[in-house]
Image (tube, rainbow, N blue to C red):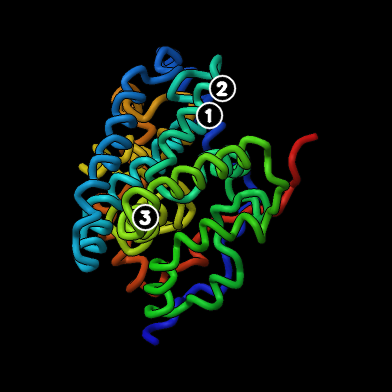
């Protein structure tokens, strides 16, 4: 089973999450960053082009062999679908049309969700905003692995399978750790997605549906673009709970690698996060950062000091009334 991880518990802290206090310090020194708040008018065209690319691929995939279907799903379709998941991340922060037009953001989220094959845009928003506000909370922050995950996947081989199974944990962990009743828009999201999937199977066949859904799942697991799931908050350096990555994969992931910057300023669109770093470099240049998401995956699996336990946790405080 390979080497056993050296940690036997999470890293517990009794301090507040670091981003609110750093945001205050940065804005006191660089108030011009507030001018970056808002939405990105280019975003809707980029995300729409990705959706249309996947729709065009339906005509290509339907006539391919099963082997080619899975190859295209991993190398091409999964990458686009993962990027569309991160488009839904931008939409969760109302960065497609701004906070003044919440329903426009939700409707565009339904559209971006279509090629992914699984309804997630509304459910993701419901949990993700709490991840920002209650980062590290043992109950509310469902980005944190459970004790069961940490205990079961505590060897080199175990961590390999944990990485491969990441999409399942992201789908089902919130339902176990912090279940919430479905919202009306979640049901609408599900109905629209089911109708789209039915039309796809009816007119293009099952190969195309497999291409879309399997691509989404593969690109959330053992895949270079999925390295950001681990790079963002797993404790590679003691005491640091958020990490940025400034490499080229940001070009296809709406700059999600600028993760310290994003948590400090979630109202800044992804396209403008490099500007935050340019304005306030002393706050970001000297803290630990990653240079490769692929290397993150390799180190996570092979380094015994890193594993599902390598997360900073805080005792549950409960949501504000």
Query: Looking at the picture, does residue 254 appear above or below residue 69?
Result: above
Residue that carries the numbered disc 1 in the rendered image:
106
Please state, as top left, top right, bottom left or bottom right, where the C terminus lies in the image: top right
Question: Which residue is at the far front?
Answer: 202
The span from disc 1 to disc 2 (Cα, nearest Å) is 6 Å
Residue that carries the numbered disc 2 in the rendered image:
102
Q: Quadrant of residue 274?
A: top left
Direction from residue 96 to residue 223 in the image, left or right: left
The span from disc 1 to disc 3 (Cα, nearest Å) is 24 Å
- Looking at the image, which residue is at 24% across and 67% down? 66
Question: Disc count in the image?
Answer: 3
Question: Residues at badges 1 and 2 in contact (C-beta under 8 Å)?
Answer: yes
Decide: few, some or many residues near mark 1? Use Cα within 10 Å; few <14, some 14-19, many ≥20: many
Residue that carries the numbered disc 3 in the rendered image:
209
The span from disc 3 to disc 2 (Cα, nearest Å) is 30 Å
Question: Which residue is at the far right?
Answer: 321
Which mark identifies residue 98? none
Please state, as top left, top right, bottom left or bottom right, where the N terminus lies in the image: bottom left
Q: Secondary structure at mark 3?
A: helix
Residue 227: in sight, yes or no? no
Query: Looking at the picture, does residue 185 appear above or below residue 24?
Result: below
Direction from residue 113 to residue 134 in the image, left or right: right
Viewer-closest of 12 and 137: 137
First along the sequence among labels 3 and 2: 2
Viewer-closest of 214 and 247: 214
- Looking at the image, which residue is at 28% across and 35% down? 52
Q: Position of residue 195 (x, y in %)?
A: 50, 44
Decide: few, some or many residues near mark 3? Use Cα within 10 Å; few <14, some 14-19, many ≥20: many
């Amino acid at each position: 089973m390979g080497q056993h991880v050296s940690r036997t518990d999470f890293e517990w802290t009794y301090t507040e999450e670091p981003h609110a206090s750093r945001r205050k310090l940065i804005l006191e020194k660089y108030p011009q960053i507030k001018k970056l708040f808002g939405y990105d008018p280019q975003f809707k065209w980029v995300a729409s082009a990705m959706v249309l690319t996947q729709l065009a691929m339906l005509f290509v995939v339907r006539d391919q062999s099963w082997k080619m279907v899975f190859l295209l799903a991993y190398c091409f379709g999964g990458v686009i679908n993962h990027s569309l998941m991160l488009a839904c991340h931008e939409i969760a922060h109302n960065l497609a049309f701004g906070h003044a037009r919440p329903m426009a953001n939700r409707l565009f989220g339904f559209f971006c969700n279509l090629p992914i094959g699984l309804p997630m845009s509304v459910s993701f928003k419901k949990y993700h905003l709490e991840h920002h506000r209650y980062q590290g909370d043992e109950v509310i922050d469902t980005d944190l692995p459970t004790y069961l995950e940490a205990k079961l996947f505590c060897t080199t081989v175990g961590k390999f399978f944990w990485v491969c199974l990441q999409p399942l944990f992201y789908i089902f962990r919130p339902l176990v750790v912090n279940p919430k009743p479905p919202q009306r828009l979640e049901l609408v999201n599900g109905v629209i997605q089911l109708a789209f999937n039915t039309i796809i199977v009816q007119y293009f066949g099952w190969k195309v549906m497999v291409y879309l859904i399997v691509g989404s799942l593969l690109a959330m697991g053992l895949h270079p673009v999925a390295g950001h799931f681990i790079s963002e908050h797993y404790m590679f350096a003691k005491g640091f709970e958020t990490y940025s990555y400034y490499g080229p994969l940001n070009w296809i992931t709406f700059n999600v690698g600028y993760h310290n910057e994003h948590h400090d300023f979630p109202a800044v669109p992804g396209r403008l996060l490099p500007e935050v770093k340019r304005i306030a470099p002393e706050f970001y240049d000297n803290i630990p950062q990653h240079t490769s998401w692929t290397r993150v995956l390799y180190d996570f699996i092979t380094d015994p000091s890193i594993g599902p336990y390598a997360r900073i946790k805080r005792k549950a405080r409960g949501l504000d009334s």
